[in-house]
Image (tube, helix red, strand yellow):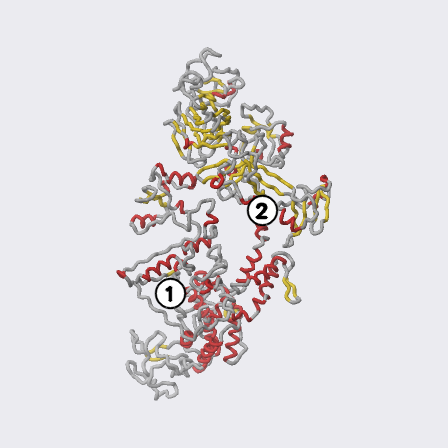
Amino acid sequence: MCAHPDLPHASEACCDNYDEDTVSNAARNYLYDGERVTYATAENRCGSLCMYKDMDGVIPKDKRHTGYHWLNTPCDIRAKINSEGYVAIVHYLDTISLDDIPRHVSDESLNYFKVYWSGGDYPSVASNNCGDCLVLSDVNGDACLCQTTVVDKAVFNTAVNVTAADILSSLTVGHMDPDVYNGTSYTEEDEGDFTAYIMYTKAGVYDTSTVFKAEDDVGRTLFLRNVRSIVELKGWESAYTPTTFEAEEASNSSDAVFKTASRSTGTGYLDFGASMDQYVQWEVSVPQEVAVNLKFRYALDNYNRPMEVHVNGVSVVPLLDFPSCGDNDDYWMYTAAVTTTLAAGTNIVRLQAPSNSSWPKSNMNLTYVGNDDDIDGLLQQCQGDCDNDADCAEGLYCFQRSSNKNPRVPGCSLTYPYSVPHRSSTDYCAPLEYRYSEGGPNIDHLLIEGLPSAQPSDEVSYSFRNPVHFMGLLQDYSSDGIGETNARDAHYETSAVLDHYFYHESTAPFVCIRLIQRFGISNPSPRYVAACSEAFKTGTYTAGTVEFGSGKYGDLEAAAAAISLDREATSPVLDLEPGAGSLREPLMKIIGLMRNLEYTHAPRETFAELWRTQNRISQEPYEFPSVFSFFLPEYIPDGSPVGTASHVSPESQLLDMPSSIEMLNGLFSLVKYGLSDCMDDGNDHGFALYPGFGSCRDNGQFERAIGTMEYQLQATSTEDIIDELATLVTAGRLSKKNREIIASIYDAELNNIECGSASLRKQDYRGVLSTSRDGYTCQKWTSQTPNSHSYTPENYPDAGLGDHNYCRNPNPWRTYTWCYITDHPSGSTWQRCEDIPECGDEASARRLALQAMLATPEFHSTTPIKTVTDKARPAASESTGGSGPGSDYKAIVYLFFDGGADTFNMLPPYPGSCPAENDLYAKYSAIRGNVALTAADMEALSVTDHHSNCTAFGLHNSLELLKELYDNETALFVSNTGLLAKPVDKSNYRGETPTQLFAHNAMQKESKALDLEREVVGTGIIGRLADALNGDGYSCGTYSIAGNQIALVGEPGNSPSPIVLSDSGLKAFDPQSSTEWLAKFSPNLDMTEI
């Protein structure tokens, strides 16, 4: 491959006895292992460099000695431009062997990168037929191949009227600090707001070696070379304009078979068999007589197979060598150029295998013996019997004749120069040129240089800025990283990329918006974002007389101060703005509550572990469900007024029924039982694991908790207690209406008759509980049926007994309430009743008030809630389902696979199932190369009436279930579908496609919505299907077990809202409610839509 001759890229390999007609060996000449020098140094040390075959004196697999070495082969760097104007680097060596060119810099390269074109125009097959450049056509699409010239020009030739801003906007190539030269190379000149460093040898002249020092707007000191490096594209000299004629464009003999290969430039190549007299020929039309060079691109895995070259029936080369170039599938090369003349009109260029009768070297089946031993005596040409090369005179080699061929030896006769014995077993000495095999090579295409070009080749039509990069293109030749693609340069390249991102002008507002959202404001104003961005870039923020930050770009202290102290974060006026604030993250609700109410570990515990909250509240530390974290910063709740107002609500992405129920159950458990796994209904409702002991009792003992909230309220009156809790839990946002309701709950608990005193062994209980702990009905105290007893009102007049069946405790030796029961199946006469809470227990009342407060929207958001109505929330209507025409039940199950799916290897064409004129499998295989599936990798799916006329497609053999469903006619594939709004091609799809391509999250949403024309914004494909079915009289609902999904959203009013369920079922809300007071008052809590 090519390398810059002025840079030390390779070592020297000296060719003292170089012969242009043969391939020579070279000798190592460097001073130490791994030394790399410039081309001039290598040439000076050696005297001559060459295109060598092997390196003398190198031990096989000795990686220290097998690195890159300079060759004297001319080398060009070309640019390959695709339809979008992206460029790939192509190296071209003036050598017959293309396997010297690595694939990543060959004309097959697909390593495209973006460049900045002067004027925005670039060569394109579609728009200008590549101008004066070569058109490349292969399975990867059309591209242009142009010659390049790099032109370096000085940008400034004076410092007069030049500012630092001019320098920063005009120069793009960096330089090391000239001070490292210790004043030996540059002189420093102060030019005001920048510094110019001029090389001493230039005597004050501003040229491309001048270095400018300037500070940019983020405080970085940059050293920039005074150079603008431009890559100019040109066509070819008319004598060397290359045009490719593919093998599939040629006609050929019946013995030559057309095949496909991954590295052929067209769709395939012609494979010559072992027989003679084969040919391939092309028609070439030219407007006038022209001198051209002919080259054939071929592959050959063993001995040279010469061919005859004919033009218009006349032999121009009797025998053109096709030396071996390695494995047919991986290595292709060009022959030596054949110079000839094409006549005006149509010409026939023919490549012909030689015949047995016309060529004296007709016996083409000699086998090379080798050179292993050394014996006395040297045999001359055509003499035998030799055993190896050492038996032959200089320049001769030992060959073995095949027993089934003509006994004559190639290059020999019976009389001259020596008689040859007619014994087929004899081995003979002959020149190396007679080492041939039968048949012909694999032919990829004919390349003709010199056909008339469309434009003058010296006209520069296109140019782009020469991009800077650190990584070399020379591949490593060992796992030790000895080559140019080393870790050092990878670090430099990565560091440069990170710096580019970090200092990009959009980084500060990008970071600030996301930080402000995390500080509780989903929709910051542009002014707010600008203030934070300025603090981020300058590294300082001043509030009054206090200054925050270090003064360095990206200082997060300054950014945090700008966010926290800005008037948009502190002004109470914005509390009345409906778009202010945000929903709180699920995890932040838990952590905030625990911190504000002073969570304390139990003595036996060292930390608080929240157990598997990702599956319950959709958020857990270090458990991001995807690379996009828990929710998207640009998320808009589907079908909500948030989108109408052009606002976002990121946290709403996690707000659904299952996670809301789990959140409240967990919070209630935290209040009633401490941090534990309770509630005691057979399900784990708490946020912690079962510690192995204790029971779940709402009695203030927290016996099963690993930690509790220990905050001690300072207030004493009901009103003050509710206000203090509201400050701790909702930052004072709790509405007046909700305060009054929660105060009523608090007072009702204090005055609750459903209580008893522990000190009195619950004998003072006067409530109306009438069932035992196991749910059996209590017997009236005045009744003797079915159980006779002495605990009558007459015998215990102060125990609260009477003509009722309420739980009581008339005997002082028991510590709980109990009753006689009427319906126990085993005949038990009495059972204890459920535990009765303490009467007048302020702690119990606070726990109940706190639970009610946690159910208000003020706790779940960072903004006060505007009361929409005083009406109670209407009861949800129950869907009957199954109604409509026919009343049959059917469902569409929509599976969406997150991440990447290689659909080309999920449902490819099946081999041999498509017609030859449209062989989809051949095209698929040519494009996919080594990763293409074979028949052994697929299950065949029979198809009928397919537009391609294929009879089968292949299904990846790991998808057995889909195969079964397809065969049973219960599943089908809809292929060739996607987000295509209009017909586009590779040259215009970026600008003509309305979707945000290459953004994973955007493409997911677009795929679920399928509304490219934005006709029904905020709806999805399944939701609109449900709207249509409901409009036709069906009863159709939509359900998700994967959270909120736009795919299920229809137009408002047309269908019921989507119901979000959990993949593990839906848990009951507050299954162990503290008292009936919470159930009684909670429907009146203002829980209006945010």
SS at badge 1: loop
Q: Callout 2, which amino acid?
A: His
Which of 729 and 96 lies nearest the eye of the viewer? 96
- Crowd band around label 1 with a 10 angstrom C-alpha radius: few (<14), some (14–19), many (20+): few
Q: Callout 1, which amino acid?
A: Gly
> Which residue appears at 47% of the width and 22% of the height?
316
**In the depicted structure, whether residue 857 falls above or below residue 492:** below
Image quarter (top left, top right, bottom left or bottom right) of the N terminus: top right
Is residue 758 at least partly visible in the picture?
no
Q: Is residue 460 left or right of residue 697?
A: right
Query: Residue 34 location, x and y as percent?
Result: 60, 36
SS at badge 2: helix
Q: Quadrant of residue 941?
A: top left
- Crowd band around label 2 with a 10 angstrom C-alpha radius: few (<14), some (14–19), many (20+): few
Is residue 746 at least partly visible in the picture?
yes
Which of 87 and 708 lies nearest the eye of the viewer? 87
**In the depicted structure, whether residue 1018 falls above or below residue 899:** below
Q: Is residue 552 left or right of residue 770?
A: right
Query: Residue 553 location, x and y as percent?
Result: 62, 56
Q: Which residue is mark 1?
A: 1053
Q: Which residue is mark 2?
A: 491
Q: What's the distance in space between the residues labelled 1 and 2, CA to CA?
A: 57 Å
**In the depicted structure, whether residue 930 falls above or below residue 516:** above
Q: Earlier in the sequence, mark 1 or mark 2?
A: 2
